[in-house]
Image (cartoon, grey):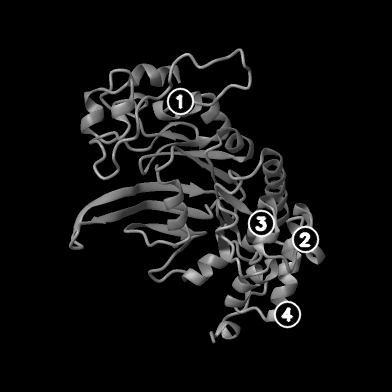
Amino acid sequence: MTDIDNREPVSRDFDLREPDTREPDSRDRGGPRQPILSVRGLRKYFPLRGPLGTINAHVQAVDGVNFDVMKGETLGVVGESGCGKSTTARLLMRLIEPDAGSIVLDGDPIGHGGITLRELRRNMQMVFQDSYASLNPRHTATEEITFGLRVHGMSSAKARDQALASLRLVGLDPTVFADRYPHEMSGGQRQRVNVARGIALNPRVLILDESVSALDKSVQAQVLNLLADLKERLNLTYVFISHDLNVVHHVSDRVLVMYLGKVVELGPVDRIYRAAAHPYTRALFASRLSMNPAVRVGAVPLAGDPPNPVRPPSGCRFRTRCTMAEAVCAVVEPVLSDIADAHQAACHAVIPGSGHSQAEAIARAA
């Protein structure tokens, strides 16, 4: 038996009043301008072991990632498979421990004398891509949601009431779905249960890791509309990870672009999609298929595979695939720099004084 009923209880219920009539959130410590999430120098290398267990090399999955997430926004995270998006999400949740770096939640550092993991996970939850694998096949929908509530100290009766309220919020009738097992639900219904589990603790941040990519388009649209509604009703902040650039454009306020474990561009969604600064971001957007059959892609926007993350290129990691690469790109690693209002990029070609031959001309044009 565990001591789940002896832990500090969760006491905050859903506040479903209109935003203008809500009481101030008692959990808000730094005001609306303080980021709800600040990440600095986040790094995770996975060891590669030889036959005798000795470490021969490391996969540099996430390397020196820095960004902020503002209260009430949706931060979209995009990039090719293997760029470190999902690893970053798991590091934020501390499902895996970072090798270095800091994570600050509304002014409070996580660990090292700051808030505990239990407090972190009350305030930040995650919805995973695979709606079936992320649910316990032996749990009904209600049991799946109440488990986390009871771990955080809520009584069984109160946890069940909260679970039923969560199911209603995600559009599932508790009289129909409360006692169903995962195999008795469709993919969209299972993902709604995952969302219900994520919001049951009434968190402040919800990390959505490819949470709609496995769904049919019609169901995907329903879940996206649901997420937009929940964000407004529950005053949530989203970190939205996806390969679907059109969906990211639709739901995000700002966009973060990753390549081979690094952040290469960050800025407002409209500016990034209209005038991306980094060559990788431009190539990524150019790879989208047009809805007009008369408009065809004449040339491959990005050739070759990403380099080996065990031995990434020196300097700029994108230089081996970049048409604008020069000598400075192989020697000096570009840092994320301001190129316009709230728009940052890590590319020598757009940073004045970097030593790139096109930097000054591009800066003037911008």
Looking at numbered disc 4 in the image, what kind of residue is underneath it?
Answer: Ala
x 66%, y 41%: residue: 216
Q: Using a 10 Å C-alpha cutoff, classify the residue at mark 2 as few (fewer than 14 neighbours), some (14 to 19) or many (20 or more).
A: some
Mark 1 and mark 3: Cα distance apart in space:
35 Å
Q: What's the mark number on residue 321?
A: none
Mark 2 or mark 3, earlier in chain? 2
Q: Position of residue 261 (x, y in %)?
A: 36, 44
| Quarter assignment of residue 264 | top left
Q: Nearer the viewer, mark 2 or mark 3?
A: 3
Q: Position of residue 283 (x, y in %)?
A: 44, 25
Provide the residue designation for mark 2: 168
Mark 1 and mark 2: Cα distance apart in space:
41 Å
Looking at numbered disc 2 in the image, what kind of residue is underneath it?
Answer: Arg
Provide the residue designation for mark 3: 190
Provide the residue designation for mark 4: 157
Quadrant housing the N terminus: bottom right
Looking at numbered disc 3 in the image, what kind of residue is underneath it?
Answer: Arg
Say left or right for 98 vs 330: right
Q: Is residue 184 above or below residue 217?
A: below
